[in-house]
Amino acid sequence: MPNSGGTIVLLPGDGIGPEVAREARLVLEHLVPDVEIVEHPIGGAAIRATGSPLPAETLDACLASVAVLKAPVGDPEFDGKDVRPEQGLLGLRAALDAYANLRPAVQDDVDVLIVRELVGGLYFGASGVRDDGTAFDTCEYTPSQIERVVRRAFRFAQARSGRLTSVDKANVLETSRLWRRVVDSVAGDYPDVTVEHMLVDNAAMQLATNPEQFDVLVTENMFGDILSDLAAAVTGGLGLAPSASLSDGGPGIFEPVHGSAPDIAGRGIANPTAMLRSTALLLEHGLGLRGHAQRLASAIDAALLVAPTPDLGGKATTAQLGEAVRAQLVVDGASVPSYLA
């Protein structure tokens, strides 16, 4: 159901984050003027301001929101430190229980949706360094953790072409053998979906060489992290790739896949496409406004043709591409300003 009221929390993040976040905010203010947008720090900016990458005030605001729109975090200043910007992101995902990470990869004949389990596995298991210098990271999954993300993926497959590929490493890992058993047990509840199991190394090769064969892929945290970046590279690069991380009933997190790019921060040349496409995912999955999401997605595609940023071989600034998107939204299909000259 549409939920166009309430508060959206905008987290500008680090590096180019504030620049691309500005364009997302302007689009939201145009499309959903009745929604309140509040900004809070996260990541490196939050560490400098409060000492924490996820301040309590930021987390409380996110928990009370209808959706969270987050720009990238990360700053070389904190490399190797005990407190790092990325800890804020992991903490936010865990606190919101945003377990289902959607990574669409679309270009020409390729239309793949990767559903990645986001709050379990290696990234959240026990880790450390023993006295002898041995380092360890633990991958653990419970059947219930797997089942809920797998059911999400089945429902997405039902709404698309009815094909689901479950990716694991069941020939080696016990967690993957559990994963496969859960998928098989759930499959009977979705007789209209055809299920295929695929080992992750084969899945990577197939994504690189024949991505058109896939519709919905579902997999665990680390495999999903790697495969979704590969899928993004196949369909235009990380600079264009959005994501949505959904919970059950609470606010989702919507964010670009790319990093904070501190080397170009403040120069006004960052490509805001991934942030704007993440905003479209927020409109659809966070507010239930699919029509608005489709309008924004079409406006972004049209604007990219006439106002590409330098990473795409053009001359448009961050603000100019954002302006071209908003102009397309205003005229609903008419020509948009060109910054190619």
Image (cartoon, rainbow, N blue to C red):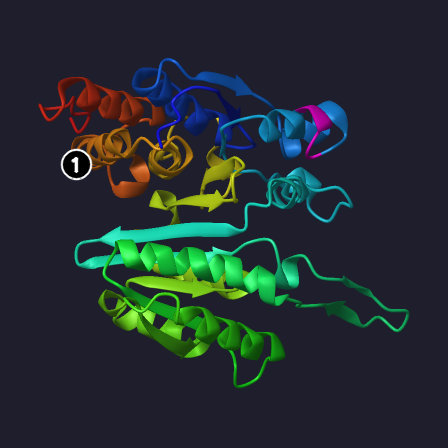
**55 is within the stretch colored magenta:** yes
Tell how many labels.
1
Helix, strand, or loop for circle 1?
A: helix
Mark 1 is on which residue type? Leu
Could you tell me if residue 158 is visible in this image?
Answer: yes
Residue identifier under label 1: 305
Residue in view at x 54 percent, y 64 percent: 146
The picture places residue 77, in percent across and down from the top left corner, at 67, 38
The residue sitting at the front extreme is 189
Specify start and end residues of the magenta stretch as a single range: 53-57
> Is 72 or 158 nearer to us in this picture?
158
Q: Give left or right: position of 2 versus 120.
A: left
Quadrant containing the N terminus is top left
Residue in view at x 66 percent, y 68 percent: 139
> Is 33 or 211 nearer to us in this picture?
33
Q: Quadrant of residue 301?
A: top left
Residue in view at x 72 percent, y 28 percent: 56
Q: Name the dominant secondary structure of the magenta segment.
A: loop
The residue sitting at the bottom extreme is 171
Q: Give left or right: position of 271 versus 199.
A: left
Question: How many other residues sit within 10 Å of disc 1, few (<14), some (14-19) or many (≥20)?
Answer: few
